[in-house]
């Protein structure tokens, strides 16, 4: 077993209330892509944080290149050639790309022999070369605040390379990327492997593991379940191991039973802050019991359509008609009360108030009316009762019950809380924007089941997603959006994935 | 006209060094409302040193001023440890810490001034009498029309502060230490991940802040006021903070802001004298810099970019 570059033996780590890692042992060979697969909260990130020196294990030992090591901080790990790209990037926005990369290992020289200064020109040059060498094109003098997320991620990778890291940990690197950017990242990872780097990939997306990883350790509730060669394991097998039960990738859908139109959008146009038409003359109708999905590449106006219907964005032109009544001039609350539920794309910005408690967040649609509030005074008991009811009904996992601060919960459970809150309103129209973004398989299955249940109840559902599989699985009708215009609307069973993909790229009727 | 420049600069430069002091602290992520207290306590230590040393090396010896400035810097840095302790070590609310320190400064210096005076001379006065610094005029430059006043009747400390500020700009913007300090105020997590010690950098920044504010305070005591007494607490520290905000937390624009405040103050005064208004109007004119502050902040502070992490204690485990 001497060929391991990193070995973690019998690692146990406890946090108040939970065992994050329970006697986990893994060994990673030099030059392989080793994936850690598990649902949110399975202990993958904790295990890697231990390897990166952020946490110290309660028990167990770590060997790097055959030597036992004790990391007290990430600096110790970095000295051993270990680098990590965190899920939340650690970048300084007003600094340039190069400044961010050299931070901590600045190229300091002495001017006139005494005056220290930083040779940024030299650093810029080095970073340019490094980025070309690994196919990670960046402009070293751009400011971080001005570049998109995918470039920021490249900067994080360059940071590790600049420090000469040989072992690289990626924590859910694709969660923030679009499908095209994911392809590019996987190429980069492959590149790094060919350059002899060892990659540890934390993920809950099996498709990525199948594409890039050599071996894969599956964790569930802090325990190591299995270690598999990826080539010999099927997607279904991996999914079952990860979740601990049989996973259904496609949901059983009942035959459609459409009723009268619930939402009619007529010639909708929405402008952005630069007076640019981000949504152009969009028209569609959703009937009760129908799932209408809008497919499209990110940034083609999807979010703006949803915001315009929910009242968060101004309608520049056109009409939005709900249950036969025009709602253009209603404010957000009036629209909610007339029967719209909205699960927005951004959980923490639009969907919740992350620093308030779960019970307060669950009551956001209700707090202003009886029994939650009487004559302007909030009543405590209804909040708690309502929260407890929703926590049970939607299986929201929270450490301190209704009093849990929302931010401290996992992304999947935050999403459960939002979906639960919105579905509980029994609205006629439910808008789901990217409802499964960042969720693991079990949670995705759960959200999909709920969407279909609402469809059966007779709600009209607008589903906006970047995941084509999700759309093909759920939708009754598909509209494809390209640069703010709907290029094609058709029944889902008359369209293939390839066709939808072509329209997403802007190809009009052949 | 010459007088406007001469007085304007002798006010603007001490103000500037206080503003840069506050800026160092805030750039590292520690909100600093304590500049007012720092400059007062710094001035106290400087004035105490001058009072004690005066009889030893001879009153009127200008060397005392430089010793006083040094002691003011040390005293300011020492006093700023309280702010560091509260904000960095105990993670207290930084705004409240600043306000409390300002109140504390007034009380402590008043008490110790009279205590020191009664010990030295038996007279419990709340004042340390200081000599006024000598002034000098640079030949040739001072005869340039219009702006000659800049080089007329200068205090030596003006030159010192100008040189110091250039050095401080270099330190903040061109060195490793400065870059880490600025990063601490924007995203301390990034600094921590890069292997540097956020809290240590913040401690150093706060102490630099205290030292610089102390220098500003003693310079006021040696020029405008001519003694050390509670009248040192006239809100110069707050004005310096306003200049820093108006200067968008950058040393260059902050210098400009201080110059504007200085010239507004001396200009208002000269206007009042030129118009031969009764002296009770003087106070009205002395308000000018503050009214200017108010207006400028209303119109120009919207697009400002304060350090993102200023006011937030560093929490290693937060993501």
Image: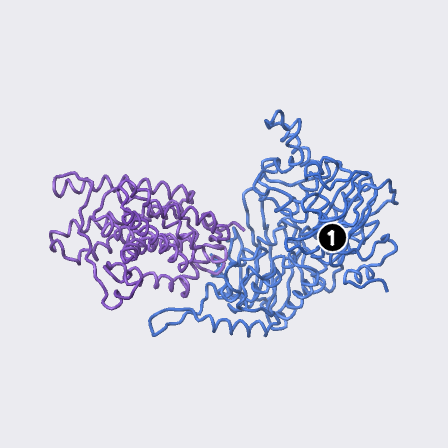
Residue A347, horizontal then vertical, whole percent: 64, 46
Query: Which quadrant of the view contains residue B9?
Result: bottom left
Chain letter behind tag 1: A
Picture quarter with the N terminus of chain A? bottom right
Nearer to us in this view, A373 or A474: A373
Q: Is residue B128 left or right of residue A394?
A: left
Nearer to us in this view, B12 or A86: B12
| Residue drawn where x is 64% and y is 45% of the image | A350
- Kindly indicate which chain is depicted in blue in the rendered structure: A
Q: Secondary structure at mark 1?
A: loop
Q: Is residue B216 left or right of residue A500?
A: left
| Residue drawn where x is 76% and y is 63% of the image | A505
Q: Which residue is mark 1?
A: A465
Residue closest to the far front: B275
- Kindly indicate which chain is depicted in purple in the rendered structure: B
Residue closest to the far top: A375
B7 over B286 or under it: above or below: below
Residue A156, horizontal then vertical, whole percent: 56, 63
The answer, for residue A224, to whether it is visible in the render is yes
Residue B204, horizontal then vertical, whole percent: 36, 55
Picture quarter with the C terminus of chain A? bottom right
Q: How is the image coloured?
A: by chain
Residue B116, horizontal then vertical, whole percent: 18, 42
């Amino acid at each position: 077993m001497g060929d391991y570059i990193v070995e973690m033996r019998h690692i146990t780590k406890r946090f108040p209330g939970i065992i994050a890692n329970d006697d986990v042992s893994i060994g990673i060979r030099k030059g392989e892509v080793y994936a850690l697969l598990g649902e949110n909260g399975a202990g993958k990130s904790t295990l890697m944080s231990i390897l990166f020196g952020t946490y110290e294990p309660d028990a167990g030992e770590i060997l790097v290149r055959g030597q036992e090591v004790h990391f007290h901080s990430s600096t110790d790990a970095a000295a051993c050639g270990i680098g990590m790209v965190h899920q939340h990037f650690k970048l300084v926005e007003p600094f340039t790309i190069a400044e961010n990369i050299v931070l901590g290992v600045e190229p300091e020289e002495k001017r006139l022999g005494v005056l220290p200064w930083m040779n940024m020109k030299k650093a810029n040059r080095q970073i340019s070369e490094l980025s070309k060498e690994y196919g990670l094109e960046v402009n070293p003098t751009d400011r971080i605040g001005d570049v998109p997320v995918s470039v920021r991620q490249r900067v994080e990778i360059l940071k590790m390379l600049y420090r000469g890291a040989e072992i690289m940990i990626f924590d859910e690197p694709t969660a923030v990327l679009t499908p095209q950017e994911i392809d590019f990242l996987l190429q980069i990872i492959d590149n790094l492997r060919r350059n002899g780097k060892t990659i540890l990939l934390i993920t809950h997306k099996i498709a990525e593991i199948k594409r890039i990883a050599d071996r894969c350790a599956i964790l569930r509730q802090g325990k190591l379940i299995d270690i598999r060669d990826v080539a010999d394991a099927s997607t279904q097998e991996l999914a079952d191991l990860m979740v601990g039960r049989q996973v259904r990738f496609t949901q059983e859908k009942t035959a459609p039973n459409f009723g009268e139109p619930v939402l009619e959008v007529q010639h909708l146009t929405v402008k952005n802050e630069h007076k640019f038409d981000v949504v152009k003359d969009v028209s569609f109708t959703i009937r009760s019991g129908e799932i209408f999905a809008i497919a499209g590449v990110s940034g083609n106006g999807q979010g703006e359509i949803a915001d315009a219907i929910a009242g968060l964005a101004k309608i520049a032109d056109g009409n939005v008609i709900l249950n036969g009544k025009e709602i253009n001039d209603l404010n957000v609350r009036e629209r909610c009360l007339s029967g719209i539920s909205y699960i927005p794309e951004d959980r923490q910005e639009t969907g919740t108030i992350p620093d308030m408690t779960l019970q307060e967040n669950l009551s956001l649609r209700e707090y202003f009316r009886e029994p939650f509030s009487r004559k302007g005074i909030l009543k405590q008991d209804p909040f708690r009762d309502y929260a407890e009811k929703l926590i049970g009904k939607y299986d929201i996992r929270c450490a301190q019950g209704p009093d849990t601060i929302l931010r401290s919960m996992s992304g999947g459970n935050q999403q459960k809380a939002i979906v639960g809150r919105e579905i509980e309103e029994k609205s006629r129209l439910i808008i789901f924007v990217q409802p499964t973004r960042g969720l693991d398989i079990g949670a995705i299955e759960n959200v999909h089941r709920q969407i279909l249940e609402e469809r059966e109840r007779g709600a009209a559902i607008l589903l906006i997603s970047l995941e084509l599989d999700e759309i093909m699985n759920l939708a009754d009708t598909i509209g494809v959006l390209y640069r703010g215009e709907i290029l094609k609307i058709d029944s889902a069973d008359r369209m293939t994935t390839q066709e939808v993909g072509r329209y997403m790229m802007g190809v009009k009727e052949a | 006209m010459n007088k406007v420049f001469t007085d304007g600069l002798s006010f603007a430069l001490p103000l500037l060094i206080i503003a840069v002091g506050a800026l160092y602290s805030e750039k590292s992520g520690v909100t600093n409302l304590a500049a007012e207290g720092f400059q007062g306590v710094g001035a106290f230590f400087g004035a105490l040193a001058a009072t004690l040393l005066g009889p030893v090396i001879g009153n009127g010896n200008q060397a005392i001023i430089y010793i006083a400035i040094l002691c003011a810097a040390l005293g300011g840095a020492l006093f700023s440890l309280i702010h560091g302790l509260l904000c960095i070590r105990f993670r207290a609310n930084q705004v409240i810490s600043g306000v409390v320190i300002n109140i504390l400064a007034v009380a402590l210096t008043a008490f110790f001034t009279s205590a020191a005076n009664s010990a030295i001379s038996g007279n419990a006065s709340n004042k340390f009498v200081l000599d006024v610094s000598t002034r000098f005029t640079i030949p040739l430059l001072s005869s340039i029309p219009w702006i000659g006043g800049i080089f007329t009747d200068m205090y030596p400390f003006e030159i010192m502060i100008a040189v110091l500020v250039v050095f401080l700009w270099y330190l903040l913007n061109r060195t490793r230490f400065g870059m880490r300090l600025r990063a601490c105020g924007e995203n301390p997590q990034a600094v921590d991940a890069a292997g540097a010690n956020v809290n240590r950098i913040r401690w150093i920044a706060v102490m630099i802040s205290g030292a610089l504010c102390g220098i500003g305070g003693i310079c006021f005591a040696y020029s405008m006021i001519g003694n050390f007494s509670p009248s040192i607490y006239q809100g110069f520290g707050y004005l310096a903070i306003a200049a820093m905000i108006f200067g968008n937390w950058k040393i260059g624009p902050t210098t400009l802001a201080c110059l504007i405040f200085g010239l507004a103050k001396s200009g208002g005064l000269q206007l009042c004298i030129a118009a031969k208004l009764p002296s009770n109007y003087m106070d009205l004119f002395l308000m000018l810099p503050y009214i200017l502050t108010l207006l400028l902040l209303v119109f120009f502070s919207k697009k400002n970019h304060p350090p993102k992490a200023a006011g937030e204690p560093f929490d290693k485990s937060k993501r």
